[in-house]
Image (cartoon, helix red, strand yellow):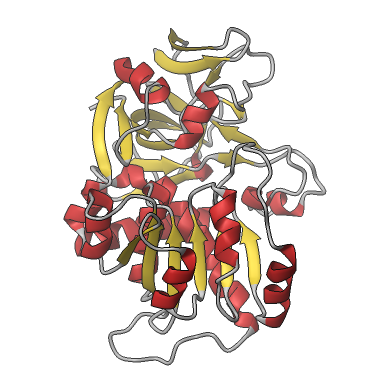
Amino acid sequence: MRAIAVLPGKKSVELIDVPEPRLASPTQVKLRMLEVGICGTDREICRFDYGTPPAGSDRLVIGHESLGEVVEGGSAVTGLAPGDLVIPMVRRPCPHDDCVACRAGRQDFCFTGDFTERGIKSRDGFMTEFVVDEATYMNLVPRTLRDVAILVEPLTIAEKGLMQVWQVQQRLPWACPTSAGKENGHCHTAVVLGAGPVGLLGAMALVAQGFETFVYSRERAPNPKASLVEAIGGRYVSAEETSLAGLQKRAGNIDVVYEATGASKVAFEMLEVMGTNAIFVFTGVPGRRGPVEVDTDLLMRNMVLKNQVLFGTVNAGKDAFEAAIRDVALFDGRWPAELRSLLTGRFPMGAYRDLLLGEASGIKNVMTIAA
């Protein structure tokens, strides 16, 4: 069968032939891969910034944002049947008995760092025609979401972050007064840094939870991303027209910042204008661009005197995948055109060089593996 792989030793990205996998245990399922989303991580792996082949192999099959169809299940598999659509999780637990996170099924919080990730670290990914994996890592998707389900995995980043926001903010009286027809976040203001797929999906999640949501991105409006933000009830602010201080003046007390750029300079500048009792969620992983100047005294003063919290979040657990599937269905009912506008185009496997090595374009490009 065909697969897209990176070969670090040769510094090449190739369409290769690999053996079709077979079930090796009664708890496994075999998937026909339907689609794989292309993201910045894939492109960075194809630049050989990181990405680790499985032990004993010279190549890594890439792809971690995926949608598959069950074609076969082992004798011990329950709750899944041939024809079911599933989103596989990405991370697999480390082998250490003393890692309480992995032993509890929360490998997204692995203590040892010896986890593996499909398509990223020491385990082949989903950019291939068939995959065999453990059924426990599958998340069932309604067939009504077939054309937008590929957005589930990038949405899990926001879902996990927001779960932690609500948990952390139990430290203070933060819940909004209940009002008929209003969501839990209706008395709070959120800022999303970045208008890529992770940022826009995060904005949808925040709006759906009732937050007054601002998306701060470079491009001047009007542009398609700004139109999307306004259509879902958010507010788009261009960094070319408005400073962060100007953004804070418009937004008032900023309660939540959801960072989705990987740009450390703007992130730390944003910390300077964040509000009282605020919480900052880092999701981006910046490249090594050199040092940036930071007013550490101001940041520390704000964090102490304003009771602020900063945390980073990566990967996602099963609860975030389930929440993302529910929210994609919610977005599909509430903003069907806007949700689909995130999907720039679908391309065959043969277009892998342009998708992975060419200039990035659009919002979310998708590789079609099977119809």
Q: Is residue 261 left or right of residue 209?
A: right
Residue 91 seen in this snapshot: yes
Q: Residue at x 68, y 68 (%)?
A: 299
The location of residue 118, given as percent across then percent down, is 54, 32
Q: Is residue 77 above or below residue 348?
A: below
Q: Which residue is drawn at 59% across and 35% down?
A: 117
The location of residue 319, given as percent across then percent down, is 51, 58
Q: Is residue 207 left or right of residue 227?
A: right
Q: State the quadrant of the C terminus.
A: top left
Q: Residue at x 48, y 20 (%)?
A: 22
Residue 79 seen in this snapshot: no
The location of residue 241, given as percent across then percent down, is 35, 59
The location of residue 23, given as percent across then percent down, is 49, 25
Q: Give the farthest residue toward the right.
A: 98
Q: Give the farthest residue toward the left.
A: 337
Q: Is residue 116 above or below residue 277?
A: above
